[in-house]
Amino acid sequence: MSRNSQQKVSELPTNRFEVITGRLKEVENVSKDIEIATLLGMDKSTFSNAKRTGSIPYSRLAEYSRDKQVSLEYLINGKGPVHIKDMIAEPGAIYKIETNQDSVYTIAKMVIEEIATRQGVLIEQYKIEDIIKLIHRDVLATGEQAISLERVKQLLDLTE
């Protein structure tokens, strides 16, 4: 640690909320709580209440992590790299992908448009998320940037 960044042990944050928001401030190069509140999509009052109670907004941290490609592991535990590229988020997990993310979303868009055309209805959000996850897993498993027509038909059946 440099001399300027050293703190006395008694000055270090004592609750997890302060530790995590401290890491956010470091990553974003900001110093004010209101700046972190804004980054997390929280108003000043909600942020202040969370800080007072030590209540960590995990879902907002996960969303921030996904949007900014900042490691959730780093934010919460201070471990690993700060920034991670090519991440995908699922409920309960954010992980690095080893595929071309754009092709996964292009395939998903085509499948979802086909479902909407055939059924004439909008697809529920959780079904869209499931389709994207399944396509991503297929792309990872095959190493191809495409999926078979048979798999598309299976995905269509899942939405009925």
Image: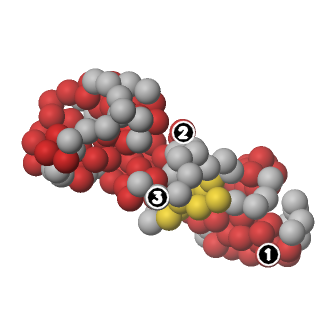
User: Horizontal and vertical percent for residue 93?
Assistant: 50, 64
Residue at the image point whose x is 59% and y is 61% from the top:
95
Mark-to-mark CA distance, 1 and 2: 27 Å
Type of amino acid under label 2: Lys
Check disc 1: other Cα within 10 Å, few if <14, some if 14-19, many if 20+.
few
Would you say 25 lies left or right of 68 here?
left
Checking the image for residue 68, the label placed there is 2
Residue where numbered disc 1 is placed: 141
Residue at the image point whose x is 53% and y is 47% from the top:
82
Q: Colour scheme in the image?
A: secondary structure
Mark-to-mark CA distance, 3 and 2: 17 Å
Q: Are marks 1 and 2 in contact (CB under 8 Å)?
A: no
User: Horizontal and vertical percent for residue 41?
Assistant: 35, 33
Can the viewer see residue 156 in this picture?
no
Can the viewer see residue 146 in this picture?
yes
For the N terminus, the image quarter is top left
Residue at the image point whose x is 68% and y is 50% from the top:
86
